[in-house]
Image (cartoon, rainbow, N blue to C red):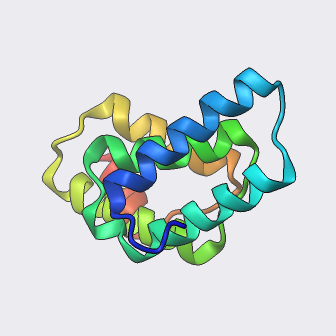
Amino acid sequence: RVEGFDGVQCVFALKAALRLCKLAAGMSDETRSVVAALLDRTKLCARELTVNGVRDTLNIANRLGVTPQREVLDAVLERALDFARLAAPGPHWAASVLADCRILKVDPASELMTTLCA
């Protein structure tokens, strides 16, 4: 049950799912549904994600081969824009976010693109 999870807990749970899938050499249907629920929950608490949490959410989704719903991606990328405006994460983080967006076949909002590429 993921209803009470905050942003940090969602990221930790996604990391655990990634480790579980590596150990099991694949993802069961049950694990896939849990990952989908975690990503959906992340949409609701994306404002709580840290700089690394934004990156981890996108990266883990990629590594698990799960494409989050567009609303989830929009929420996470909106949080990415918060950090990009501060120019706090640095160029490596920006490049990683853009690479994950490319893999997930999602176009970030133009403001995020402009800010990340500045």
Q: Is residue 51 above or below residue 75?
A: above
- Nearest the camera: 77 or 110? 77
- Residue extending farthest to the front is 1
Residue 58: percent from left, percent from top: 53, 48
Q: Residue at x 26, y 50 (%)?
A: 50
Identify the image quadrant of the N terminus: bottom right
Which is more toward the observer, 81 or 75?
Answer: 75
Q: Quadrant of residue 113?
A: bottom left
Residue 114 visible from this viewpoint: yes
Can residue 109 be seen at all in this image of the molecule?
Answer: no
- Residue at image location 44% in from the left, 55% down from the top: 10
Q: Quadrant of residue 20?
A: top right
Measuring from the top left, give residue 108's x and y in whole percent. Answer: 51, 63
Give x and y (percent) for residue 116.
34, 49
**Residue at the image position 83 percent from the left and 24 percent from the top:** 25
Image: 24 above or below 43: above
Q: Nearer the viewer, residue 48 or 16?
A: 16
Q: Is residue 64 placed above or below 70 in the rendered structure?
A: above
Q: Residue at 71% of width from left, 56% of height from top?
A: 105
Asked if residue 32 is positioned above or below residue 94 in the image, the reply reads below
Q: Is residue 116 left or right of residue 87?
A: right
Q: Is residue 76 left or right of 58 when viewed as pictured?
A: left
- Count of all numbered marks drawn on residues in the image: 0
Q: Position of residue 15 (x, y in %)?
A: 51, 37
